[in-house]
Amino acid sequence: MSNLFPCLWFKSEAEEALRYYVSIIRNSSMENVHRAGEVGPFSKGAVISVTALLDGQRVLALNGNPQFQFSPATSLVALCDTQAEIDDYWDKLGAGGQTMACGWLTDKYGVAWQIAPRIFPKLWSGDQASTDRVMTAMMKMVKLDIAGLQKAFDGQ
């Protein structure tokens, strides 16, 4: 497992958010919940940080200063094999959040996600005309449609 992993800074919802993600993302599990003791700025027993594996990727969630906000400038990417998987992640992670163009959404905690097909590298590896068609098709989509992107790549 990599020694490089993201840390998500929440106001106070670190444990709730990671449990939510673990319930949605396959091959995921909670690792550790670190609670405050007698020393430090947190109340005794308060959750300070949480780690989980999300589809094999370690993620650290921290309850910290509420002045820091999530931004779409940093996002988590969920690559999906099927349209059904895109639809499932889109519906569950987007619930209570906000959808954006080109397969992006923010979840109910404000974390930005890109819900994308695993075949994206193939769709971007063709000649310039095919990649331009894929880009044109994608720019018209909110939730990405694998069949529509493939048709654009194929020139149909």
Image: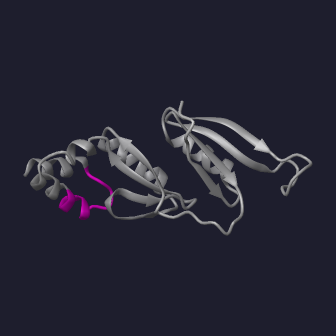
Q: Quadrant of residue 117?
A: top left
Is residue 151 shown left or right of residue 96?
left
Measured as percent of width and height from the top left, residue 37 is found at 88, 46
Is residue 117 shown in magenta? Answer: no
Q: Residue at x 50, y 32 (%)?
A: 27
Q: Horizontal placement of 148 versus 46: left or right?
A: left
Residue 13 position, x and y percent, is: 67, 55
- Where are the magenta residues, as a range? 135-145
Q: Give the farthest residue toward the bottom.
A: 67
- Front-most of 114 and 107? 114
Q: Where does the image place residue 52, in percent across and percent down from the top left? A: 61, 39
Which residue is at the front of the view, 28 or 122? 122
Q: Is residue 25 depicted above or below 98 in this figure?
A: above
Spot the residue most to the left: 156
Q: How many marks?
A: 0
Is residue 140 highlighted in magenta? yes
Residue at left offset 63%, top offset 66%: 68
Q: Residue at x 88, y 50 (%)?
A: 44
Relative height, residue 24 to residue 90 (above, below): above
Q: Quadrant of the N terminus?
A: top right
